[in-house]
Image (cartoon, helix red, strand yellow):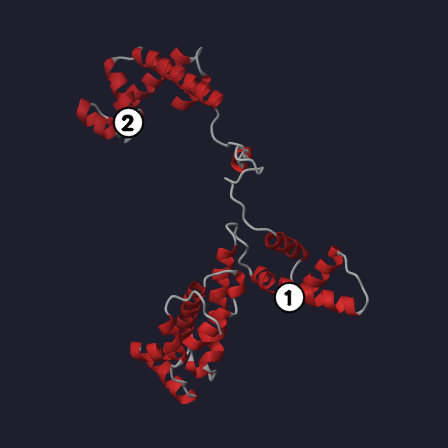
């Protein structure tokens, strides 16, 4: 088994030379970890089955992931299996660990296959790892019968064979048929060609909208300044403290500062707002709503 690209060959060789556990020893180690959290027992169990993790990782090299990363993911799956293994069920640890190791590797491969998330449901995983194999098998069988399948027939047969919806098959075919392209790549072979990113619509605020918004804000500030200038000093102070602060003050705190009751502060505030509304009647209905 070739392990090109694996950074620590000595670790791999050490895993391959690790002890082979019999059923009784394996069960004792599993009990020691489950019941006493004996880390030495866990380490021995993990070390003994690292060869299984490495062997399974090697089967996924065709998906283009670095072997070192695949082994790391397989190791994580092995550790999860050890943590969740129940020796009372009477199952060998290797049989139980296979599922966790495979699931961990498959999740990693799918996460790194494309910048666009390929999928995470059980049907999408099944399609990702079995589509090409099932498609080739169906085409061979049809050829042996002297039949020629069109794409729609083939997709329907794949859907039935794997047990997934037809639209999932069509979606996964599209995902697997092409590779990711950089948005900074040019649309032509010329050096001065336009980049693909330049064809994307800018969903940010446009210049005209920015100018219009700035104009509206300036008008709003002017209207409010005019309305505030028509108030008495006390009214202006109360409105500013109640409505223009990031942390508005309470009626009670203003009453204590001004030597008035809370109810009197509320009455002054209401009178000030009525004055401002009258001042703004002919200027902006929007400001009236802000003050309501």
Q: Residue at 54% of width from left, 64% of height from top?
A: 62
| Res. 248 visible in picture | yes
Residue 185's mark?
Answer: none
- x, y percent for residue 39: 30, 76
> Residue drawn 48% across and 56% down?
112
Q: Decide which of 29, 270 is in the foreground and name it.
A: 29
Q: Say which of marks 2 and 1 sits in front.
A: 1
Residue corresponding to mark 1: 133
- Left or right: where 249 falls relative to 109: left
Q: Nearer the viewer, residue 271 or 29?
A: 29
Circle count: 2
Is residue 292 in sight in this rendering? no
Pick the residue in front: 200 or 35: 200
Q: Quadrant of residue 230?
A: top left
Which part of the image, by quadrant, shows the C terminus? Answer: top left
x and y, in percent, of residue 42 in the image: 34, 77
Compared to residue 51, the image places residue 151 above or below, namely above
Which numbered disc flags the more N-terminal residue, 2 or 1?
1
Residue that carries the numbered disc 2 in the rendered image: 245
Residue at the front extreme of this rendering: 190
Q: Nearer the viewer, residue 29 or 179?
A: 179
The reply, left or right, for residue 37 in relation to residue 94 is: left
Local packing at callout 2 (Cα closer than 10 Å; few below 14, some 14-19, many 20+) is few
Tell whether 149 sits left or right of 117. Answer: right
Q: Quadrant of residue 3?
A: bottom left
Dot 1 crowding, Cα within 10 Å, few <14, some 14–19, many 20+: few
Q: Are marks 2 and 1 in contact (CB under 8 Å)?
A: no
Residue 12 image point, x, y percent = 39, 74
Q: Secondary structure at mark 1?
A: helix
**Relative image position of residue 207 (x, y in whole percent):** 47, 22
Disc 2 versus disc 1: distance between alpha carbons? 67 Å
Q: Residue at x 36, y 85 (%)?
A: 28
């Amino acid at each position: 088994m070739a392990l090109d690209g694996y950074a620590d060959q000595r670790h791999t060789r050490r895993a391959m030379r690790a002890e082979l556990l019999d059923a009784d020893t394996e069960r004792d180690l599993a009990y020691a970890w489950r019941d006493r959290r004996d880390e030495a027992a866990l380490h021995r169990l993990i070390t003994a089955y690292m060869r299984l993790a490495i062997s399974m990782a090697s089967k996924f090299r065709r998906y283009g992931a670095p072997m070192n990363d695949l082994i790391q993911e397989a190791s994580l799956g092995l550790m999860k299996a050890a943590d969740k293994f129940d020796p009372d069920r009477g199952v060998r640890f290797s049989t139980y660990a296979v599922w966790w190791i495979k699931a961990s590797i498959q999740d990693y491969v799918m996460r790194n296959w494309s910048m666009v998330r390929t999928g995470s449901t059980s049907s999408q995983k099944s399609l990702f790892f079995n589509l090409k194999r099932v498609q080739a098998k169906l085409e061979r069988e049809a050829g042996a019968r002297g039949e020629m399948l069109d794409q729609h027939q083939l997709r329907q047969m794949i859907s039935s064979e794997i047990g997934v919806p037809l639209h999932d098959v069509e979606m996964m075919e599209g995902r697997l048929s092409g590779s990711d392209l950089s948005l900074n790549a040019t649309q032509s072979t010329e050096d001065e060609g336009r980049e693909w990113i330049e064809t994307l619509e800018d969903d940010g605020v446009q210049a005209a909208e920015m100018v219009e918004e700035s104009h509206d804000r300036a008008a709003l500030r002017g209207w409010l300044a005019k309305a505030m200038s028509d108030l008495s000093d006390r009214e202006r102070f109360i409105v500013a403290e109640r409505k223009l602060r990031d942390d508005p003050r309470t009626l009670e705190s203003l009453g204590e500062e001004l030597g008035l009751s809370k109810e009197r502060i509320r009455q002054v505030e209401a009178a000030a707002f009525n004055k401002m509304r009258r001042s703004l009647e002919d200027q902006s209905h929007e400001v009236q709503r802000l003050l309501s």
